[in-house]
Amino acid sequence: MASSTIRLLISCPDARGLIAEATTFVRDHGGNILEADQHTDPTQGRFFMRLEIDPGELDLDQDAFARAWAPVAARLSMGWRLASGEQRKRIALLAGPQTHCVSDILYRVWSGEIDAEIACVVSNHESAGEIAASLGRPFTHLPVALGDEGEQERAVRDVLDASGADVVVLARYMRVLSPGFVAAYPNRIINIHHSFLPAFVGAKPYHQAFARGVKLIGATSHYVTDRLDEGPIIAQQTSGISHRDTIEDLVRKGRDLERVVLGEAVRLHVEDRVIIDGNKTVVFE
């Protein structure tokens, strides 16, 4: 179920009294803090905080809260954002020929494990259509014609914009997005890469891992930037392998990791638990 809470996320230079400033502001306006978490990075002198606030007795609505908080934040050089737990984020899923990730996200949303809505499912293959239809989600098939990649990408953007999507999830979409596409959804495109980044970037990482003889494989979910596979990392996991494992074994084990890691990253994002700081993230789990 959606939460009626207000979420306040803060990042700023570290200083004395920052926690008191935020919590006193909430108290003075009648709010009750349900969850609080903070982190100080001593090497960079940075402070991060996430508050989840019960608005039931606040003397401000969300817009008024933002207006009242803005001068406090400006005085303390804070970067901040306010989000409503009551407004479910709308997820656009971009799928490729493999359906294990798109089907997993669809199930997690359907079951309530991820508290969000599916705005649309778009794919350059038809394989995800039946899965989306089985859960009553809109599906659009937009194949890519050789030499006409730009037109297909524009069509995808038209679908996403019409759907009102808040976040775009690349569920093994397996296409490199143009800088213009990425810029249209800043810090709102989440990818799953089938490797423990920064190792084995690009195509066929399981084949690269097999050739290298590694003893661990992994999966990484990250925000997409215009630098391939280098965006801020949200979640990662690994799985042990041995000399007995074939490439097919690595792919099979990797698919399980991909499902779990992407699902976790999407959940963290829609619950406003991620603060991006440069090319790193602070994740309040």
Image (cartoon, rainbow, N blue to C red):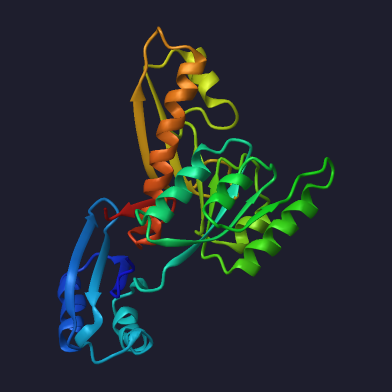
Name the residue at 37% across, 52% down: 281
Q: Is residue 98 above or below residue 139?
A: above
Residue 272 vs residue 95, the one in the foreground: 95
Q: Is residue 117 above or below residue 96?
A: below
- Quadrant location of the N terminus in the rendered image: bottom left
Name the residue at 61% across, 44% down: 128
Residue 61 vs residue 76, the one in the foreground: 61
- The answer to whether any part of residue 107 appears in the image is yes
Q: Residue furthest right?
A: 147
Name the residue at 35% across, 63% down: 272
Residue 106 vs residue 26, the one in the foreground: 106
Q: Residue furthest front?
A: 134
| Location of residue 118 in the rendering, given as x and y in whole percent from the top left corner | 51, 60
* Number of on-image labels: 0
Q: Residue furthest top?
A: 244
Residue 218 vs residue 266, the one in the foreground: 266
Quarter assignment of residue 130: top right
| Location of residue 24 in the rendering, given as x and y in whole percent from the top left corner | 15, 81
Name the residue at 64% across, 67% down: 161
Q: Horizontally, is 54 left or right of 184 in the view?
A: left
- The answer to whether any part of residue 232 appears in the image is no
Quarter assignment of residue 274: bottom left
| Location of residue 32 in the rendering, given as x and y in whole percent from the top left corner | 16, 78
Q: Horizontally, is 141 left or right of 62 in the view?
A: right
| Location of residue 108 in the rendering, given as x and y in whole percent from the top left corner | 40, 50
